[in-house]
Amino acid sequence: MQTGFLAWLFAALACAGNAYATPAATPDIYKIAAPEVNRIFGGDRQDTFVNDGLLREAVLGSIGEPDDPRELRDGSTMMTGCRPHSCMEKGAVIVNGASKQLRAAAILHFHCRLALLESETLDTPPGNKCDTDPTLEIFVIRRNGTPAALKQELGYVRELEAWGKAQQFKYEFTHVKKVPPR
C-alpha cells in the first residue's frame, strides 16, 4: 500500500510546476508554438479539460510540463508534455522551425462538459462532468490544399495518433479537425 502511495507521490511531483514551463531543451519550440497557438485558436472554445474552455489554453496547458522534443522525418519538431497537476491529460505540438509555423497540435483529455441535471431531481447543482475514458483531439493546420501538403498533414495525424496510442491511458475516441491559419 505504501509503495503505491510513493509511486503516486513521485508521479504527482514530476508533473508539478509552472503551467507554461520552458526547460532549457524546449524554449525554441515553445517560442514558436505559443504565439502560433494563440493566433490560430484565438477565442475558440471547446469542452476539453473544462466546460467551454479556451482551446488555446487547453493546447498550451497540455504541454505545460514538456518532454524532450524530437525531430520528425520532414524536419519538423514534435514536443509533447502533460498538464501540470494532471499528467493523465497530455498534449503535443508539431512545429516547423524553418518557417516558424505550427503544423499540428493534439490534446488527450477527458471531455469535461457542463452537467445541468445529474439526477431526476433538481437538487444537484450544475457543474463539470468528465468522461472516464480520454479523447484524442487532433488539430491539423491547413495552410494549403496541394497533394504534397495533404500528404504531410496525414503524416502529422499518423504521428499524433501513434503518440496517443503510446500513452498509459488508452483513449476512447479520436477527433481530427482541420484548422485554417489566421
Image (cartoon, rainbow, N blue to C red):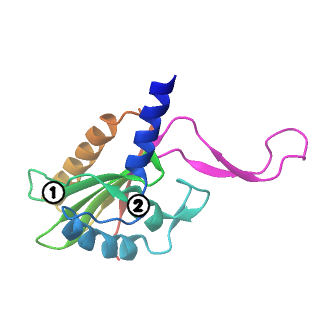
**x and y percentages locating residue 118 in the rendered image:** 79, 42
Within 10 Å of disc 1 (Cα), the crowding (few <14, some 14-19, many 20+) is: few
Residue 129 visible in the current orientation: yes
Reply above or below: 118 against 5. below
Does the magenta portion include 8? no
Q: Is residue 105 left or right of residue 77?
A: right
Quarter of the image with the C terminus is bottom left
Give the residue drawn at x 25%, y 73%. 31
Q: Quadrant of residue 60?
A: bottom left
Q: Position of residue 154 (x, y in %)?
A: 23, 49
Q: Name the quadrant containing residue 30.
A: bottom left
Residue 48 in the figure: left or right of residue 65: right
Q: Is residue 123 magenta?
A: yes
Task: From the viewer's side, name the closer residue of 104 and 15.
Answer: 15
| Residue at image coords 43%, 61% | 61
In the picture of the structure, the residue carrying the numbered disc 2 is 59
Question: In this orientation, which residue lies closer to the viewer: 116 or 6?
Answer: 6
Q: What are the residue bounds of the magenta stretch?
A: 107-135
Whether residue 138 is visible to the viewer of this picture, yes or no, is: no
Considering depth in this image, is 95 or 69 the residue closer to the camera?
A: 69
Q: Which mark is residue 147?
A: 1
Q: Secondary structure at mark 1?
A: helix
Q: Nearer the viewer, mark 2 or mark 1?
A: 2
141 with respect to 100 (left or right) = right
Q: In the displayed image of the protein, which residue is found farthest to the front?
A: 2
Most extreme residue toward the top is: 1
Horizontal and vertical percent position of residue 122: 90, 47
Q: Amino acid at mark 2?
A: Val
Can you say whether 69 is above or below 1 in the image? below
Within 10 Å of the Cα at label 2, are there few (<14), some (14-19), or many (20+) other Cα atoms? many
